[in-house]
Image (spheres, rainbow, N blue to C red):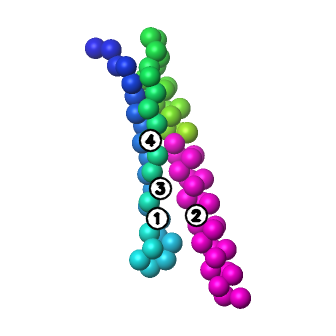
Amino acid sequence: MRLKEHTVSYGRKVQLEQFEPIDVHESVTVELEEGDDLEEVSAELDAIVRENVEQRVLKRVLSKKMEDSEDDN
């Protein structure tokens, strides 16, 4: 059996405030080439999607904190 593509997905749900959750998800699909090590490709993609999701979550959380800070003033 020859695999042609591999997809890695990662998602994270964060509760900003009561009744205000955010869901951040990302999926990446790559075409595998002859000789690609599936475990290596998977680990590399996993690191990429996790980093992207965590950066987006951090950006949203910081943005929310800034909004709350401005509302308090």
Does 62 sit above or below residue 31? below
As measured in the structure, the alpha-carbon distance from the residue carrying label 4 to the one carrying label 3 is: 11 Å
In terms of image quadrants, where is residue 38? top left
Secondary structure under tag 1 reads: strand
Label 3: state its secondary structure: strand
| Mark 1: few/some/many CA within 10 Å (<14, 14-19, 20+) | some
Q: Which residues are magenta?
A: 49-73
Distance, label 1 to label 2, CA atoms, is 9 Å
* Point 35% across, 19% down: residue: 3
Q: Which of pointers 1 and 2 lies earlier in the amino acid sequence?
A: 1
Residue named by callout 3: 24
Who comes first in sequence, dot 4 or dot 2?
Answer: 4
- Is residue 30 covered in magenta? no
Question: Which residue extends farthest top?
Answer: 34
Q: Which residue is mark 1?
A: 22
Q: Residue 21 at what x, y percent from top left?
A: 44, 69
Amino acid tagged 2: Arg
Q: Nearer the viewer, residue 66 or 12?
A: 66
Find out whether the residues at labels 3 and 1 contact each other: C-beta distance under 8 Å: yes
Residue, disc 2? 60
Q: Amino acid at mark 4?
A: Ser
Is-magenta flag for residue 54?
A: yes
Name the side, left or right, on which 55 lies relative to 33. Answer: right
